[in-house]
Amino acid sequence: MAREAAQQTMAEMNNAAALAAEQPLLSVRGLSVRFDGAPKEVNVVDDVSFSVSKGKTLCIVGESGCGKSVTSLALMGLLPTPPARIIAGSAMFDGQDLLTLSERERADLRGDRMAMIFQEPMTSLNPAFTIGDQIAEGIVRHKKVSKAEAMERALDMLRKVRIPAPEKRLRAYPHEVSGGMRQRVMIAMALANDPQLLIADEPTTALDVTIQAQILTLIRRLQEETGTAMILITHDLGVVAEVADEVAVMYAGRVVESGPVEAIFDDPQHPYTIGLMGSVPSLGRRQGRLATIRGTVPPAELMPKGCRFTPRCPFSDSRCANDPPPLTEIKPGHRARCWYAPLEQHLGAAS
Amino acid sequence: MSVAPVTNDFILEGIDLKKHFGGGGLLSSPTVVRAVDGVSLGVQRGETFAIVGESGCGKSTLGRLMLRLIEPTGGDVRYEGQSILKLSKSEMRRLRRELQIIFQDPFASLNPRMNVGDIIAEPIWLHSLASGKDKRERVADLMRTVGLLPTHTDRYPHEFSGGQRQRIGIARALAGDPKLIIGDEPVSALDVSIQAQIINLLEDLKERFGLTLVIVAHDLAVIRHMSDRVAVMYLGEIVELSETDALFDNPLHPYTQALLAAIPIPSPTNRQPKALLQGDVPSPAAPPSGCRFHTRCPHARPLCKEQHPALETAPDGRKVACHFWREIQGAGAGSISAPSQSPALAKRLALYRTWRERQDKAVTASP
């Protein structure tokens, strides 16, 4: 009891300190997105909250279908409605709620103060226009500059992302450059107007490991230079460990665990996070078989009423199946959505 | 430069294998792509052999050459000591029972118009291994073996998830009682949690049926976990061939060193700036002169541009193709240090494993 009370006061103190320090650049609260035709009560994104501050990186981790891309598209105002509908929540970006903006206001924001990098650089570049044209287009749209000035800026951006022979590449078409180069072009395009927030959706998944390392280093360096806040969406725990300040682990549309990157890796709480870490082969000498997570994500119509991880969780019981656990603070800033966290305290004795 | 392996019990050997694309007829492209250029390797019985490299290095082409799914431009493939290149079509078909492949994309490699039962039964029928009731029982058996429900035989591939489809592909590969299976990026299209399931399944099957596995992959962590020996490829050539632990502990070739340094390490504690490889892989249609890696190599010297390094054998039996491997030895040692687990993670992971086993037992107990 006394310990709980102490924890609470500590948490309050921490909250107060955080408030005094800095308002986050983007603060998402209770975001829920529903697809038309989905079963009742099953939102594809359900009560998702997170925030990201200037110059910091938030990684959203999860497997396919966990809602990480839908979340980012909702923030960018790129969700196709219908079928997708935002049914609850707010996303405060620099004093404005992104979710209530008109289409026009959103278009003014997109590519200017917030920008996005997509996973597949081949399909997100227009094959019929040169690289220079495509970068300049965004600059002309948001800044009062001539086409020539925009092209000059585009050339600057290509230099900044370290593309060799930038003058030549400016006139090249997307098919004429390699995958890693295309991703650099995407980054140049996204950063052309010095955005305050960059959302990168699996920016390195399609790339080879040596190219991935180049791109991650590049993004980090540019972020240091410009102070851009970043939301990086990935399924790769290695990438998370290398770039994140804060982490949100998503499973089946809900944030199941969130906190500072050290807390997530050194003190993981949710069984899904733990299972995920056990599933990744170690780079060191082999230590027996991999731990696995049973089965797959259930389809929407079979989604349990309570915790959505119930059917796959080794620790689950009837309580988990019926009551959705809240996202509880375990330590200041570190939250987990599990009835039994920390596991060893609740289940250690029984094993 | 064919290194004739004399010792060892090789089940499958490639000798000076070459595959060049293009440059043939009137209508084909005049540029010749040397996808695989003089590769020799031997796969030992019962081992897991990995071929690793970045896209365009020729690893998939090599995998297909080893099964004679495509005809080599030069060189030889020997299975159980016999060349398989001279076999007739029908002889080759009989041999395919023993040599199987699992493909990367579980969405493209299964016929969408066949139900799962037929997909798995096809090799059984093709090789006349069983018919009627026997065949059905065998299919049900195989499905159980790979962790699918035998009641799902009537379903079509689109009704399954990616991981389940990969299991179907594995069941089909197992149907003819193979001796050797090549997995061409068998887990890279799958989610992390599903990937771990398939890796464990492949290891179980290897043990149970005494298989030899050849894994073609780009994910070095998966390779370290699964394989006994590794061949690293760059632009159609093997640059290093070594036992897995030795390769990861002390990579000899500068390309292997760079590859290992580029892996993101899943631990946030000691982040440090890395020495990165610059530039892209050159086009295999116009590979650089001399050592093909010299354009990106941090240790390159004038000799590297002029002379092509042979794959030489180091004293400990490892093979490396670099003029200066002795001098740059140790440049990559310890480049990847496995992150040590925090006590909290280790404790919870142990707890997770215990309960996870219990979960499996509960399933087998209640059908």
Image (cartoon, coloured by chain):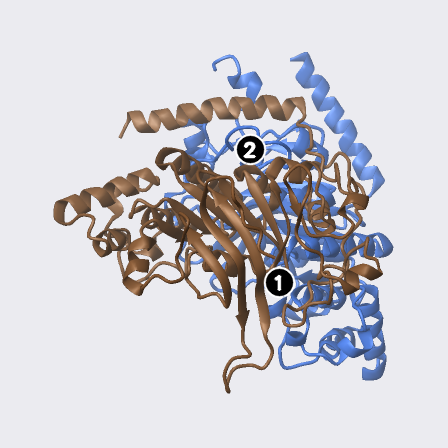
Chain colours: A blue, B brown
A258 displayed left or right of B190 = right
Q: Nearer the viewer, residue B33 or B201?
A: B33
B223 displayed left or right of B130 = right
Q: Position of residue B143 (x, y in %)?
A: 29, 43
Q: Chain of mark 2?
A: A
Bin the neighbour count of mark 2 within 10 Å (Cα to Cα): few under 14, some 14-19, many 20 and up.
many
Q: Chain of mark 1?
A: A
Q: Position of residue B105 (x, y in %)?
A: 45, 57
Question: In the rendered structure, which amino acid carries the disc numbered 1?
Answer: Gly
Query: Residue at 76% across / 55% down in the picture?
Result: B277
Instruction: Check the image and report above or below for B246 versus A224.
Output: above
Q: In terms of sequence position, does the residue under pointer 2 or pointer 1 come before the other? A: 1
Instruction: Check the image and report above or below for B72 versus B148.
Output: below
Spatial distance from mark 2 to mark 1, Cα to Cα? 36 Å
Residue B278 occupies quadrant: bottom right
Q: Is residue B71 visible?
A: yes
Tell me, yes or no, whether dots 2 and 1 are on the same chain. yes
A69 displayed left or right of B111 = right
Q: Nearer the viewer, residue B93 or B6?
A: B6
Farthest-out residue, bottom? B26
Q: Secondary structure at mark 2?
A: helix
Q: Which residue in the protein does label 2 denote? A: A278
Q: Is residue A306 visible?
A: no
The tally of labels here is 2
Q: Which residue in the protein does label 1 denote? A: A77
Q: Position of residue A107 (x, y in %)?
A: 68, 69
Q: Position of residue A274 (x, y in %)?
A: 56, 32
Bin the neighbour count of mark 1 within 10 Å (Cα to Cα): few under 14, some 14-19, many 20 and up.
many
Question: In the rendered structure, which amino acid carries the disc numbered 2?
Answer: Gly
Residue A155 occupies quadrant: bottom right
Q: Nearer the viewer, residue A246 or B221?
A: B221
Give the position of the N terminus of chain A as an image quadrant. top right
